[in-house]
Image (cartoon, helix red, strand yellow):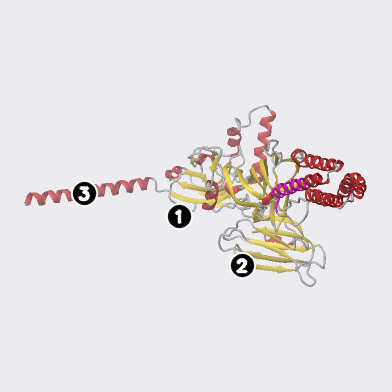
């Protein structure tokens, strides 16, 4: 028992020693990397950057900086200078040196390190993970330094960034260092005025468009929004209302009395997106000038100059087109079946990504993958509805390609039935029909507008449709019920070969044969032939009626068949009367009447045909 107790005691003592040693090691590691770490974040557009001032750095300190893009396709570049720089001066110097290098016939890309060295004490572009930037710098002398964070000068990139700044903290170079709460870098608002933007637009309210709805770009906590509106005439008094994402009014302003302008401002306590600015005038018409700004109180004077990024979201322009590869008319059900390809091209910054995240130059989504991706990331994309679609749309393939800068290409090949509400069979079978495929945006026009995808929309030459030929097509875009709409209209004309050889020539031959019977003196035989012709025309009538819906009006073919049907019925009746006269012993009277009818019969057909052509709608 004593031996076992001693064994347990020594085991416990050994574990305690190991734990103490590990604690000491961890303490030594932290002591070795016990510097200050600060985490900063912001956003950089394609033409812009952010300056930070690092105050009172001491000689011998080691400065560590790590920058990464966290949204968009941002490829960060960082540079440290021992003097104060401004964005305008730095940009002017950079492009001046680039132009000089090009004038000397040198490769500007090869000369970039030389250009960077002339402006920065130390700099980096891609020494971090992927496209991340990182450097370590031993401070050579006490003083203030300036840190620039910008998108790589070699291409246009944009997005949000995260930056770690550390003093004597080498773990910063891994990108995973934890902030210690120390303040090392301070935003330099004099070098680049951060978060300030001013935009000016003009517009018109009309009876057709009595309201303008403008969507604001996302605002951050602490931003203040300013708006100034003035009317072009004294009798026009627009109302300005700022609403949040849920249509709740936040502020309002209206011209009234002797005022010629109105202003409003609102301070946002938290991040906000999809806020709207409504402009209306109680049905009045007129022109207005609107000045909006973020963190720019000078907007309220109406004299602020345009600067910074747009304050209002411009609607995304979507190029859209449809090509019909095959169609088949179902005129009885007043629709047509089409095999078509629909393409859309647009660019949205929220779709942008950094190529180093996937080591790819584009991403491809198949089937419902893009729709699921957009829903998961709350991304609005130009979803559409086919206005005249009937039933399901059978998609053969659907692909979306997205590029790092946010460009997207949507491709869908599908088969579906389309309503043809403009079908008019009045001139059947000489009719020309108007067919169309219309795509309507699901979002209001302030989010997406459509434009034609040039040299794509149209009708293919080989349609596999034998009865119809396409004689014209037209593409148009418009606004329907405040939403973007695209329409491919095409006119089709019926091939007449079938109707000429299967309908009209047989009818003409039957009429001629009917006329030949008038030269027979056996009126009984003529009754038999006329009755048989009547049955033939009845058969024609059923054949034609089976191709068309039950119309509420007469077509050209209906009038032709009705005319021949009536004439055949009259011919039967006429020959019966002549036969009756012969039976009653009035052969001479029957012959005299028949002598005139032989020539009147074809003349009636000719006159009827001329009248049909003259008075039939064209």
Residue for badge 3: 15
Label 2 vs label 1: CA separation?
A: 38 Å
Question: What secondary structure predominates along the stretch shown in magenta?
Answer: helix
Residue for badge 2: 248
Query: Badge 2 local density, few (<14 within 10 Å), some, or many (20+)?
Result: few
Residue 523 pos. (x, y %):
83, 46
Label 1 vs label 3: CA separation?
A: 35 Å
Name the secondary structure under disc 1: loop
Taking the image as drawn, is residue 349 in sight? yes
Label 2 vs label 3: CA separation?
A: 64 Å
Asked if residue 464 lies left or right of residue 255, the reply is: left
Name the secondary structure under disc 3: helix
Tell us which disc is closer to us: 2 or 1: 2
Name the secondary structure under disc 2: loop
Residue 221 pos. (x, y %):
56, 60
Counting residues from the start of the chain, the first of labels 2 and 1 encountered is: 1
Q: Give the range drawn in magenta.
A: 532-549
The image shows residue 392, relative to residue 454, as above or below, that is below
Residue for badge 1: 181
Asked if residue 182 lies left or right of residue 604, the reply is: left
């Amino acid at each position: 028992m004593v031996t076992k107790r001693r064994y347990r005691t020594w085991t416990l003592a050994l574990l305690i020693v190991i734990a103490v040693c590990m604690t000491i090691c961890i303490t030594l590691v932290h002591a070795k990397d016990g510097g200050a770490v600060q985490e900063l974040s912001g956003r950089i557009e394609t033409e812009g950057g952010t300056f930070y001032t690092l105050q009172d750095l001491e000689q011998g300190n080691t400065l560590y900086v790590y920058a990464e893009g966290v949204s968009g396709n941002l490829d960060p570049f960082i540079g440290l200078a021992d003097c104060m720089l401004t964005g305008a001066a730095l940009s002017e110097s950079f492009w001046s040196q680039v132009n000089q290098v090009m004038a000397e016939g040198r490769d500007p890309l090869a000369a970039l390190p030389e250009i960077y060295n002339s402006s920065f004490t130390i700099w980096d572009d891609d020494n971090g993970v992927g496209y991340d930037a990182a450097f370590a710098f031993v401070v050579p002398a006490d003083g203030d330094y300036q840190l620039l964070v910008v998108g790589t000068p070699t291409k246009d990139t944009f997005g949000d960034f995260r930056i770690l700044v550390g003093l004597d903290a080498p773990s910063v170079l891994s990108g995973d260092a934890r902030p210690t709460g120390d303040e090392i870098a301070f935003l330099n608002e004099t070098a680049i005025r951060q978060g300030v933007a001013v935009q000016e637009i003009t517009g018109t309210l009309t009876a057709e468009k009595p309201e303008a709805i403008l969507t604001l770009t996302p605002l951050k906590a602490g931003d203040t929004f300013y708006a100034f509106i003035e009317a072009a005439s004294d009798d026009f008094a627009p109302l300005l209302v700022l609403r949040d994402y849920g249509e709740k009014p936040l502020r309002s302003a209206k011209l009234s009395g002797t005022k010629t302008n109105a202003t409003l401002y609102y301070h946002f306590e938290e991040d906000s997106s999809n806020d709207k600015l409504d402009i209306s005038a109680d049905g009045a018409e007129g022109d207005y000038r609107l000045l909006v700004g973020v963190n720019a109180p000078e907007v309220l004077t109406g004299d602020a100059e345009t600067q910074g990024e747009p304050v209002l979201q411009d609607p995304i322009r979507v190029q859209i087109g449809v090509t019909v590869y095959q169609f088949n008319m179902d005129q009885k059900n007043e629709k047509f079946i089409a095999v078509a390809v629909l393409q859309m091209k647009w660019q949205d910054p929220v779709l942008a990504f950094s190529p180093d995240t996937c080591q790819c130059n584009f991403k491809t989504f198949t089937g419902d993958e893009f729709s699921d991706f957009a829903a998961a990331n709350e991304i609005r994309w130009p979803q559409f509805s086919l206005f005249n679609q009937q039933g399901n749309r059978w998609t053969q393939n659907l692909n979306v390609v997205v590029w790092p800068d946010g460009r997207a290409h949507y491709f869908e090949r599908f088969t579906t039935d389309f309503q043809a509400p403009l079908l008019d069979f009045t001139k059947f079978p000489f009719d020309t029909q108007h067919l169309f495929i219309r795509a309507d945006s699901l979002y209001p026009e302030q989010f997406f507008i459509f434009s034609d995808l040039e040299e794509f929309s149209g009708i293919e030459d080989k349609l596999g449709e034998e009865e119809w030929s396409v004689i014209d097509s037209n593409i148009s875009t418009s606004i329907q019920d405040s939403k973007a709409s695209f329409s491919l209209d095409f006119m089709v004309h019926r091939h007449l070969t079938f109707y000429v050889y299967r309908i009209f020539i047989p009818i003409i031959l039957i009429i001629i044969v009917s006329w030949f019977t008038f030269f027979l003196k056996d009126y009984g035989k003529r009754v038999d032939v006329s009755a048989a012709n009547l049955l033939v025309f009845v058969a024609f009538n059923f054949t034609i009626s089976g191709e068309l819906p039950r119309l509420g009006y007469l077509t050209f073919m209906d009038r032709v068949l009705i005319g021949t049907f009536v004439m055949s019925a009259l011919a039967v009746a006429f020959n019966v009367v002549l036969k009756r006269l012969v039976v009653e012993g009035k052969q001479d009277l029957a012959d005299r009447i028949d002598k005139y009818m032989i020539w009147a019969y074809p003349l009636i057909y000719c006159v009827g045909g001329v009248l049909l052509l003259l008075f039939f709608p064209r």
